[in-house]
Every structure is written in C-alpha cells, then in structure tokens.
Amino acid sequence: MTGRPPLTARDFWAMAVVANRMHDGTPCVEWNGPTDRHGYGRFGRSGLAHRWAYIWANGPESIPIGTELDHLCRNRACIAPAHLEPVSHRENVLRGTSVSALAAAKTHCPQGHPYSQENTYLRPNGHRKCRTCKREGDRRRAARQREGVAA
C-alpha cells in the first residue's frame, strides 16, 4: 500500500487549540495546522478545516447545497462549530467588511439623501444612484448647456 494513511478525527483535533477570543460566551477554537493565503485552516488535500469541524459536529448533510459557512466570530482561523453558520454567498459577503459589504450597509448617499426605494436608482452595473442627486446634476448640466447656447 502506498500513500498516506487516511486522516482521522484524532489527527484533526490535534491541530486545534482553545483561544482567548470569545463569541457569545464561548471561546474560539483556532486551527494550528496549515492555512491558505486568506487565513482559513486547511486539512487534508482539499478540505477547509472549519467545514470538517462543522460536518463532524452536525453531520454530512448539515451544509445545504448552495450555502457556505460564515464565521460568526469573524475569526477565520476558528473551527468551533458553534461559531459557524451556513448562509448564502451573498449573505456571507454582506456580513463581512469588504468594500461591497460596507457600501451595501450605507443608508444615505454622500449628500445625506436616504437610499429609500423611491429615491434609489439601480444602474445597469448594479451600483446605486441617488435620484435626488441625479435630478440636481441633470438640472445643473441643462443650465450649463442653456448658458452655452445663449452666449
């Protein structure tokens, strides 16, 4: 027989350590093994450590198709099953701190107008535009054009 022996739960949990970080009163369990360039633990040839931990704790069908695990504690090295929740990719991104998540969380345009359903225009590229600011810009542009024609 060639190759490595199969990885076991014992191998897995040997690479975990209880950390000082907490979420909802329970400590993070941080991965001490190999990580990818984003800080997520790797286990085996192609597995993410937090997925292994969640499946071992909750069963093989615990992560529905089309979902991914969100780290509720915001600690990418954490593999504590209680700190993980299956959510859609969109929900996971919007819960984070990326540029798109921060933009989506804004409730008002830079000039202070609300991003309400009535006051928001969705551009073809997916970006929001304030209708009040767009109207004001259109008026200024039209006035400049009238001044150019009258001169």
Image: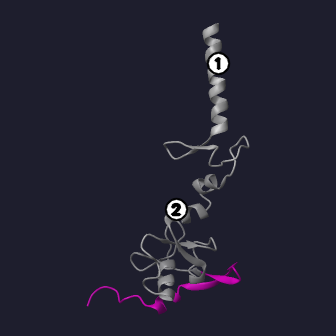
Does the stretch in magenta take in 5? Answer: yes
Per the rendered image, the range of residues in magenta is 1-29
Q: Residue at the spot x=55%, y=62% of the render?
A: 93
Residue 119 at x, y percent in the picture = 64, 43
Q: Secondary structure at mark 2?
A: helix
Q: Which quadrant of the figure contains the C terminus?
A: top right
- Looking at the rendering, which quadrant does residue 77 occupy? bottom right
Q: Which residue is mark 1?
A: 144
Is 96 on the left or on the right of 110, as rendered? left
Q: Residue at the spot x=62%, y=21% of the render?
A: 142
Q: Amino acid at mark 1?
A: Arg
Give the camera-side residue of 40 and 133.
133
Is 96 on the left or on the right of 4, as rendered? right
Q: Which residue is mark 2?
A: 90
Cα–Cα span, label 2 and label 1: 42 Å
Q: How many neighbours does mark 1 have within 10 angstroms: few (below 14), some (14-19), or many (20 or more)? A: few
Residue 26 at x, y percent in the picture = 68, 84
Does the stretch in magenta take in 130? Answer: no
Above or below, comparing residue 73 to residue 93 in the picture: below
- Looking at the rendering, which quadrant does residue 143 occupy? top right
